[in-house]
Amino acid sequence: MQNNNEITKTLSAHHVSLSYSEGQIINRMQLAIPAKKLTVILGPNGCGKSSLLKMLSRIKHPDEGCILLGEENILKMNSKTLARELALLVQKPELPEGIEVIELVSRGRYPHQKMWQQWSLDDETAVQEALIATGLTELIHRPVASLSGGQQQQVWLAMVLAQKSNILMLDEPTSFLDIRAQLLVMNFCLSLRDQGKTLVMVLHDINQAFRYADNIIMMHEGKIVAEGKPEDLANPDIIHTVYGVNTTIITDPESQTLMIIPKKDPSIEPLYSFS
């Protein structure tokens, strides 16, 4: 378990841009991810959320600018060294055929493997701690493909947890999950933050973000429109700029966090009616 007093390097982007064949998706962006907090990236489809996450984790290389971990450019870091600092869970990761829970979780230890020592007591301890933390100890010999969507997501989370990285990046970790599985994943992420981990995730559910995040980044057309605490961003004008919808802000009676309620808007009614 991580010591909350342990120094965590800050992940930051400096004037980064990224383009695909269809055009530029990120435009000279600057940001710094708060350490030991849960940051959520929000924005409409195609605004560059997942692309930003991929740049921050070196899956994509910026056309210009740089991503720093502490003072070091991540493009110049050794792959295993970077993986020990930063773990990424992509949306809908490809599942190896026939793989069991214990095998997949153990893959999280790859960055720690040495040529002369392929498996150590530290590796075994990290895997067992990850299995216990995610409640998977009774399922270790089950094929991952035989599990429910929520259980599969827990296995992937256990894998990145076993990696023992200080920074965890998750691309839409609650997509395609039922409400109970979503709660399990998000509450688990809160527990990781409380242990001193830095989490960065892309979400589509704006109210989930406002309920769980310490810090929110709102994107539109490849740029950051607003960033800050949820209570500072719960502004109908900001939300309209990002999503193009009019909203009302209320307080969730259960969590006491803010909720974003879309107003009825004739401009986004169906273009056709069906009899």
Image (spheres, rainbow, N blue to C red):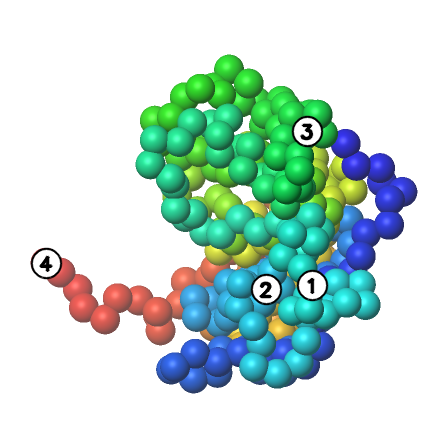
The C terminus: image quadrant: bottom left
Asked whether the beta carbons under mark 4 and mark 1 sit within 8 Å of each other, the answer is: no
Under circle 3, the secondary element is loop
Using the image as rendered, state which of residue 38 and residue 138 is in the foreground. 138
Q: Say which amino acid is labelled 4.
A: Ser
Q: Splitting the image into 4 quarters, where does residue 160 fall?
A: top right
Label 1: which residue? Answer: 77
Of marks 2 and 4, the one in the foreground: 2
Label 2: which residue? Answer: 58
Of marks 4 and 1, the one in the foreground: 1
Q: In 3D space, how far apart are the residues under numbered discs 1 and 2 (Cα atoms)?
A: 10 Å
Asked whether the beta carbons under mark 3 and mark 2 sit within 8 Å of each other, the answer is: no
Q: Say which amino acid is labelled 1.
A: Met
Q: Residue at x 13, y 60 (%)?
A: 274
Q: In 3D space, how far apart are the residues under numbered discs 3 and 2 (Cα atoms)?
A: 28 Å
Of marks 4 and 3, the one in the foreground: 3
